[in-house]
Amino acid sequence: MDHPALQSIVVLDFGSQYTQLIARRIREQNVFSVVLPCTASLTEIQGYNPAGLILSGGPCSVYDADAPPTDPQILSLGLPVLGICYGLQFMTHTLGGTVRAASKREYGHAEVSVIEPSVLFEGMPRSLSVWMSHGDEAEVLPEGFRLIAKSPSAVAGIENASKRMWAVQFHPEVHHTRFGTDLLKNFVFRICQAQPNWTPQRFIDATVASVRQTVGEHGRAICAISGGVDSSVAATLVARAIGDRLTCVFVNNGVLRKNEYEKVQENLRNKLHLNVDAVDATDRFLSKLAGVTEPERKRKIIGNEFIEVFDAEARRVERQSGAVDWLVQGTLYPDVIESVSVRGPSQTIKSHHNVGGLPDKMKLKLIEPLKDLFKDEVRRIGRDLAMPDEMLQRQPFPGPGLAVRILGEVTPERIRLLQDADDIVVAEIKRAGLYNEIWQSFAVLLPVMSVGVMGDQRTYAYTCAIRAVNSEDGMTADWVPLPYEVLKTISSRIVNEIKGINRVVYDITSKPPGTIEWE
Ligand code: XMP
């Protein structure tokens, strides 16, 4: 999606783990912000109609042989610039100052004193509690710059107001930095004078118009829909543009949650008024999964089978209604941000199932209406599209479904046990008012049988694990200390109501070293 008329704040990514947060914080102010690699060309940067430039942090030192090769001309575009952490060092070094290795690495909380009045710190206290993470520091400031803030051991803020350049050594984008958002707002509004016009309605109108134009009067599109917020919002936007010429294929792979196949169809048809083609392929998936215990094999089988089913459905739609040229995908911004690879490609821990494999095989052109958005923005758009809360707030659910939560072989009986256990976990977490506060909460069925007693009877049955985690993006996660009362109710309901599970355990592993799903 292009937004040529919209002003933006361009964030140049030097590889910091916090770069995306900078763009998010700015978009929270209704100002469009885009992340580009620090190697972006000047033309590319200017293509986003920037009102200002932010240089992110990063793991390198400006003196490293493999420091990112950034065009120094980015500092001569005449735009206001804010350097953050490595951004401060890059600015200092490029403009003729010097940077040195700090005698002591500053990591974590630090107290910073604002020593000179500056528009960057306007309205903020003169003593700030901030988040630092750096090994290098500015030593000699470039000509024309003055020191505006310092930490006990280093330069913390610099300014060259006549050149409209500012930089801070700390991270205003992380929430540990108090008043960090105020600092970013000062830069965006007071310094860059950006307009807060990046609103859900504006996005919806622009997207609908652009999809209508792209697909044309007669084009047809298809999309795989799961009932999750991303694919549902993407489909609703496209349906607003082309109506029933969009077919949403919803596949029952046999490892959905309890009653999910029916509930999702109802929501998509009756609440979002989408043209839904529901396919119950349970038998097909389960027969392929029979006897398989290896986690990656399960994932591959489900991914491949999904492509087969979807492909067959696309052909059926074509026979029925005419050629389909477009595939709609709910890809989000974090998936497409081209981060500079300063740490090398990350290792594949698990092969994620999504519909990314489809276009090659099917020769469809892609429509990705959400590829500029973060997850919380997708929810905001969904709200404006009148999507029911139940869909908007749905916790993430993996493509391979319950199959990666049933350790060992996936059988109809184990699926039923886990569906029932999962249903109890979700119901109790919702009843306790915790569902919307938790990233994911679910049950896992373990292939561990143990002895128990029920009434006067000996039992020998499965073990179920409860997992509840909080996370910003699924990349790291902390286990949630659910209240004992909630755990007690969940445990007692599971062992009493589900014949086949006689023991419940609680998973207290964070990610890393654990992963969120068990397989
Ligand atoms: P892990 O288990 O890797 O999961 O810590 C991180 C997040 O990704 C979700 N997940 C998936 N999502 N297809 C998806 O769309 C998948 O194959 C898949 N596997 C894991 C998981 O639920 C968590 O939110």
Image: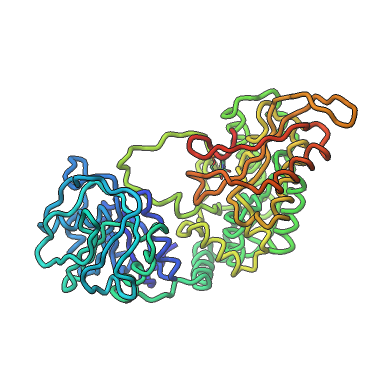
Query: Where in the figure is residue 74, as x and y percent of width and height?
Result: 21, 60
State the quadrant of the C terminus.
Answer: top right
Q: Estimate the x, y position of residue 310 in percent, counting from the top left.
A: 64, 43
- For the point 61% across and 37% down, the residue is 507
Residue 164 lies, with reference to residue 366, above or below; the image says below
Comparing 2 with 29, the one in front is 29
For residue 311, side relative to residue 52 (left or right): right
Q: Quadrant of ligand 1?
A: top right
Residue 145 on image: x %, y %: 14, 66
Which quarter of the figure is the N terminus placed in? bottom left
Q: Residue at x 32, y 69 (%)?
A: 49
Residue at (59% x, 64% y) in the render: 382
Q: Camera-side residue: 259 or 357? A: 259
Residue 235 position by quadrant: bottom right
Q: Position of residue 133 (x, y in %)?
A: 31, 49
**Closer-to-camera residue (117/250):** 117
